[in-house]
Amino acid sequence: MAASLRLFTVLGPAQKFQFRIFTKLVRPLSSGSNQYDYDLIVIGGGSGGLACSKEAAQLGRRVAVLDYVDPSPQGTVWGLGGTCVNVGCIPKKLMHHASLLGEAVKGAAKYGWDVPQETKHSWEVLVGGVQNHLRSLNWGHRVALKDKSVDYLNAYGTFVDAHTIKATTRSGKETILTADRFVIATGMRPKYPQMEGAREYAHSSDDLFSLQKPPGKTLVVGASYVALECAGFLTGLGYDVTVMMRSIPLRGFDQQMAELVIDNMVSHGTRVLRGCVPQQILKQASGELAVTWQRQTGGPGSAVDADDSDEFSTVLLAIGREPCTKSLNLDVAGVKMNESTGFIVGSEEESERTSVPNIYAIGDVLQDRPELTPVAIKAGKLLARRLYDGATEHMDYVNVPTTVFTPLEYGCVGLSEENAVQLHGEDNVEVYHAFYKPLEYIIPERNHQQCYIKMVCSRQDEKILGLHFLGPHAGEVIQGFGFAVKCGATRGQLTSVVGIHPTCAEEVIKMHVTKRSGEDATVTGC
Ligand code: FAD
Ligand code: NDP
């Protein structure tokens, strides 16, 4: 394969065309029978679906991938590549970066740069740049499918039976296709509450990254990944932002870390309303949105000036996502899903196998799996290798590192402190921690109060159960440490590594104060 790829790169365009035809003709015979149009049809051309379809095609199978985007209630649609590329990780990270640049510019004067007192940001320029990049990614995905001889259909797939689907294009043209096997990789879409005005006037993350006019004063409903990341970069870009949280921030994450994330956002100017749930959105004659909400609890940390209504220019609903399974006609194929949530339940023996032997599911649609791009991609590739290359490796969903890209990034891998205590008992868990000051923060006098690291260890053998890092470039930091945790490293092994000075990551290796000791965890000196 490598040799043929090398040959391919030195061929001219006409020869490349002939080479593709030739490789199509000499593709190994599939294990699936030719009674079907394809060996494999993948429904959903997002992170998981693209990875799986390309891998299967590379292994010589006849593969098709269907991708279709239902317009959001506000009418937003996008190209090939799924959530991450179009309305998730990529535009989010770019906007997060734009917001961090603003912070850096503010501090630049203290480093000697001659920066105007008032800096201005253009939402239109940012959206233009982001959307241009996304269009190039859409195109890149189409080319990659073509290069790998995967047939791409911009059509909505619904099952007719366990070996047949109907593909419907936007214009309503229907095609019946058969396959030996199917992979469901249809991902998730934002949820909307049963609330007056929600679908009519509110936006979701599906709309935000292509919003044509600046969002202005924004209410963000929800307090998890999507809500906090979007609220964080919108605040950083200079907008007046309120987060409406109904219970706790970042459910499922270490709550001490989550509260520090919130503290940091508040210190940057994000307003947080706790214990509140929106009731109604009405459009005013001025075009502004009047939102009414109910305060469910008071409690510490509630904004003191919280009314039960206010006007906003934009309401961003980030109250979770639901799997795109309900219109797939899974019942006619016999695929079982969790009826109340719509998630597909994987089998005990093989997480990605559904209740029907020739139908598989990967990525966000799978129940109880991390909803992350690298997870969907890896699961898709491994599945294709098991199906078509005799491989035996299964996706390991344990100790998947992740990062929340809030203004101060929060990266983690493994158990939260509370989960570790729940699983192992308080006496068996040792927590090392440190409050540190990034060197770069000193000259511009930036707030470092929330720069914090926590390592959760087994008290018996010091095996690292969880690592939590709040600080600049947390994603870059935690990726490497994720390797150590995945390999079952102990704190001793980690501290045997020599740090890289001066970095924030070295603080992980230097940590020596336990919570149990009650000693001051502030890092002083080198
Ligand atoms: P998707 O990428 O959602 O792809 C599914 C595709 O199938 C879509 O194109 C959909 O339109 C299509 N489809 C659905 N039904 C049909 C049908 N019947 N027929 C044909 N096509 C269909 N993850 C990270 O790892 N890092 C991040 O920083 C990150 N940031 C995120 C930020 C936001 C705002 C959001 C919303 C998500 C973010 N994620 C992030 C999560 C990540 O985007 C998802 O986990 C990932 O995209 C899941 O991949 P998937 O293949 O399962 O589904
Ligand atoms: P989540 O399901 O994680 O969070 C939903 C949030 O909305 C919670 O705070 C929840 O509160 C709140 N909520 C739910 N229903 C209501 C309601 N009716 N009214 C008010 N608030 C409500 O969803 P997200 O969309 O944030 O994230 C989905 C997934 O996307 C994540 O699990 C993650 O895997 C992925 N993602 C990854 C990112 C990354 O890697 N950086 C970034 C963004 C998304 P409560 O806690 O009370 O239920």
Image (cartoon, rainbow, N blue to C red):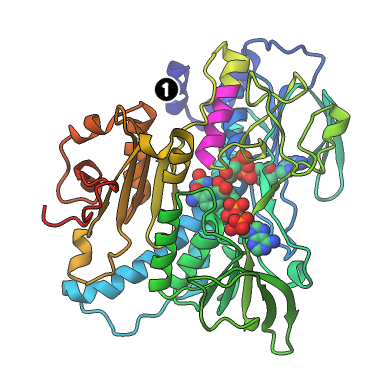
Picture quarter containing residue 98?
Answer: bottom left
Q: Is residue 135 visible?
A: no
Query: Could you tell me which secondary element the residue under label 1 belongs to?
Result: helix
Q: Residue at x 75, y 80 (%)?
A: 282
Between residue 512 and residue 408, name the one nearer to us: 512
Picture quarter containing residue 192?
Answer: bottom right
268 w.r.t. 261: above or below: below
390 w.r.t. 247: above or below: above
Q: Is residue 142 visible?
A: yes
- Name the quarter showing ligand 1: top right
Q: Percent position (x, y) of residue 435? A: 26, 56
- In the displayed structure, does residue 278 sit left or right of residue 13? right
433 w.r.t. 480: above or below: below
Kind of residue sitting beneath label 1 = Arg
For this orientation, the residue located farthest to the bottom is 286
Q: Residue at x 18, y 55 (%)?
A: 523
Picture quarter containing residue 245?
Answer: bottom right
375 falls in the magenta region:
yes
Range covered by the magenta-colored residues: 373-383
Between residue 279 and residue 500, name the one nearer to us: 279
